[in-house]
Image (spheres, helix red, strand yellow):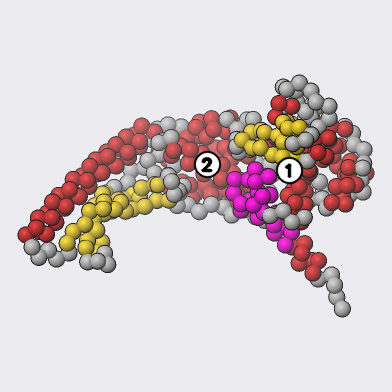
Amino acid sequence: MNQNRSVKLRQKKLLDGRLSLYLDIYPPLYIAETGKETRREFLKIYLFEKPISADQKEHNRVCKAKAESIRSERDLQYINKSFDFTDKLSAKMDFLEYFLAKTKKRNQSKGNYDNWYGAYKYLHSYTNGQCKFGDVNEKFCEGFKEYLKKVKSIKSSTVGLAQNSQYSYYNKFRAAVKEAFEERLFAVNPVLRVKGIPQAETQREFLILEELKALFETECEPPVLKRAAIFSALTGLRWSDMIKLSWKEVQGTIQDGYFIRFTQQKTQGIETLPIADQAYEQLGERGKAEDRIFKGLKYSAYTNVQLSRWVLIAGITKKITFHCFRHTYATLQLTMGTDIYTVSKLLGHRHLKTTEVYAKVIDKKKIDASKRIVL
């Protein structure tokens, strides 16, 4: 992690003829507020380009001395304290152990934990089980990215990782490095300038309104699975939030309407989600505050079999997973004219870009529909 480091005083000519003094810093400083790096720190100290009087010359002399004093101070703080101390303290720490600890903290969400643990296994393989913080530099990050592109899947010796698996695992690695940097275990974020692996566009399966109505009118075993699935299609709630939903999180009245206030498992964000009367009906008879609403609902291969059987009996041939009910909610909302910003908030997305995937689906449907009328 050792690098050539320097803090140099430089000047920039302004339009009004003055010279603005700034520090040229290498390696660049990371600015947490913008998420970007910069090599310049402007001091807001100005010189006369061509001093013509004794006062102007004295002004330049004093300002240069002040700027040089700041440069020396930054040099001491930035190099000796920020870099050398951080490097020497953390360089010999076990990065794999750190990554595994971060993975275990995600054990409340099975899907998220599995992705983190998958990333850990490939990182362990890439490093042959030996990786210190001092090993993790920009070249290492680039190398791990290329490794994920070429490595064979742990589940198969002949098939490589799918594009979205590469994307997911590398993002988990980037997240761990960023957390370590924010904890001052890295002096410089080594992954910051390394481009990520692009996500492949996937076909998000969903139900049209007629298919959802068909499911609503079809019996399902166990009944709790049907109630949960319909509730998800009417609210957009994820499986991970559904299975832990308790009565204390359901609030409101018949007159004022109902809503659920809960913490998203995936993002840990606190959400307030209004729910329609029909969605509230799927919750069943109200129990004690701590009681789980969808008691008996659990993730298993057999649950997936029961879901597939119910879908087939309803006359639907699409391959439907539980998460498809969240997709159904999003696409139906957009189809019926709800603006994308509102849909994004209802889904609890942090970024509008995540919701735009559903908008693309709707746009494609419009294009297909426009081609149906042929004279």
Task: Mark yes or no: residue 153 visible.
Answer: no
Label 2 packing within 10 angstroms: few (<14), some (14-19), many (20+): some
User: Horizontally, is 270 left or right of 128 in the view?
Assistant: right
Q: Position of residue 328 (x, y in %)?
A: 77, 48
Which is nearer the eye, 36 or 254? 254
Question: Any magenta on residue 351?
Answer: yes
Sequence-first disc among 2 and 1: 2
Residue type at the position of mark 1:
Gly
Residue highlighted by disc 1:
236
Q: Residue at x 39, y 33 (%)?
A: 90
**Given the current orientation, which residue lies at the most extreme bottom position?**
375
Quarter of the image with the N terminus is: top left
From which residue to which does the magenta span run?
A: 340-363
Residue highlighted by disc 2:
175
Label 1 packing within 10 angstroms: few (<14), some (14-19), many (20+): many
Residue type at the position of mark 2:
Ala
Q: Residue at x 27, y 67 (%)?
A: 15
Question: How many numbered marks are there?
Answer: 2
Mark 2 residue element: helix
